[in-house]
Image: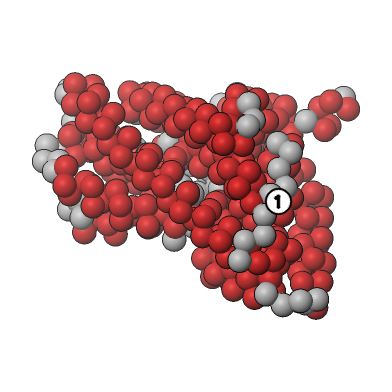
Amino acid sequence: MKFLKDNLLIKILIAIVIGMLAGSYLPEAVIRVFVTINSLFSEFLSFFIPLIIIGLIVPAIGKIGGGATKLVTYTALIAYGSTLFSGFGTYGVSMAIFPSLLENQTAENVAVATTSLTPYFSIKIPPILDVMSALVLAFIVGIGISRIKNSQLLLFSLEFESIVNKVIQKVILPFLPVFIFGIFLNMSHSGEIFLIMKVFVKIIAVIFILHIALLLIQYIIAGAISKKNPIAALKIMFPAYLTALGTQSSAATIPVTVQQATKLGLSDNIIKMVIPLCATIHLSGSTMKIVACAIALMLIQGIAIEPTVFIGFICMLGVTMVAAPGVPGGAIMAAVGILASILGFDEKSLALMISLYIAMDSFGTACNVTGDGAIAMVMDRLFRNKTVN
C-alpha cells in the first residue's frame, strides 16, 4: 500500500484503466458528478497555472544571477529548434506515407460528433493573468532581480515559491489521478474514445510512431550532451508523459514534470526555470500533430501541397506555438489563424482540423512535456556550474 501511496505513475495508470472501463457502466448521474468535479478543478488549474509560472520562474532566474538572460535565450532557441525539427521531419514522413495511406479516404470520414456530458454546475475562476502575460512578467521581474544585489523582492519570491510548491504537493498532485479518471470516464461514456480510434486509427498510428521517434532522438541528443543514459532518463520522465495524456495540458503537468526532472539529478534552479518556460514555448509534439493533420486533410480534400508554402507555414507555426497557452486544445486554437492565412483552410477545413487534432491532443501534449525534460538536461549541462553575463 505504501508503494501505491507514493507512486504517482501507478495511480495514473489505474485511473485511466478504471475510467475507460467504468464509463460504459456507471449511471449518467454519477458520471456527471465527476464531470462537475473536473470542471471545478480545471477552473482552479487555469487560475493557478500563471501563479505556478511566476512562482517558479522568478526565483529560479533571480537565484541564477548574471547567467539568467543567456539561459533564457538559449532555452528559447533550443525549444524553437526542436519545434522546427519536429515540423520539417513530420512534413517529410507525412508526404512519403500519407498519399498511399489515405487514398481511399474522403472528407466525410473524418467528421467527429461527440456527446460528452456537461457538469451540473460550474464556477468561473478567472486567472489574474493569462499564461503569456505571466511568462513575460516572470522574465522581467526575474531578470531584474538577478541584477540587484541582496534583493528584498528575491526573498519575497522565495516565500511565494514555497507557497506555490505547497499547493502543488498538497492539492494538485494528489488530485491529478481523480481528475484524469473523470476525463477518461466521460470520454468512455460518450463513446468518444472508441469512435476516435476507429475513424483516425491510421493517422493516429503514424503520428504516435513519429512522436516516440522524436522523443528518442531528443533524449539521445540530450543524453550525449549531458552524459546521461537516454533510456533511463525517458523512464524517469514517464510519469509526466502519462499525466499529460490525462490532463491534455502542458501547463497543468508542470508539477509532475518538475518532480520527475528533479529525479534526473538536475539543478533545482535550472529545473524551475526551464520546465515552466518550456511548458509554454516548447510544443514539438503539437507542431507534429498540426503539420501531419494539415497534410492529411489537404490530401483527403484534394488540395495541392506546395513545399515552399509549407516551409513558411512550419517556420511561422514554430513562432505561433510560443504564444499557445499550455491548456487542452490551446495549440490548435493558436494555429487557426495561420492555417487559414497560409494554407487557405476554409471554415469547414478548420472544423475538421480541430476535430482531428483534438482526437490526438493527449499524445502531442505528452510529447511536449516529456521533451521538456530533454531540454532541461541540456541546459543543466551547459549552465549548472557557470555564471554567464
Label 1 belongs to which residue? 385
Q: Name the side, left or right, on which 73 lies relative to 209.
A: right
Q: Name the side, left or right, on which 117 lies relative to 159.
A: left
Q: Residue at x 71, y 43 (%)?
A: 266
Query: Of helix, strand and loop, which one carries label 1?
Result: loop
Q: Quadrant of the N terminus?
A: top right
Is 275 situated above or below 99?
Answer: below
Task: Give the residue furthest to the right.
Answer: 2
Q: Position of residue 377 (x, y in %)?
A: 61, 41
Instruction: Check disc 1: other Cα within 10 Å, few if <14, some if 14-19, many if 20+.
Output: few
Q: Nearer the viewer, residue 249 or 216?
A: 216
Q: Residue at x 82, y 33 (%)?
A: 6
Q: Quadrant of the C terminus?
A: bottom right
Q: Position of residue 269 (x, y in %)?
A: 71, 54
Whether residue 72 is visible: yes
Q: Name the side, left or right, on which 237 lies relative to 287.
A: right
Is 383 situated above or below 264?
Answer: below
Q: Which amino acid type is marked by label 1?
A: Asn
Q: Position of residue 174 (x, y in %)?
A: 77, 43
Q: Residue at x 64, y 51 (%)?
A: 383
Q: Position of residue 371 (x, y in %)?
A: 53, 39
Whether residue 184 is visible: no
Q: Residue at x 78, y 55 (%)?
A: 165
Is 9 situated above or below 313?
Answer: above
Q: Name the side, left or right, on which 108 lies relative to 31.
A: left
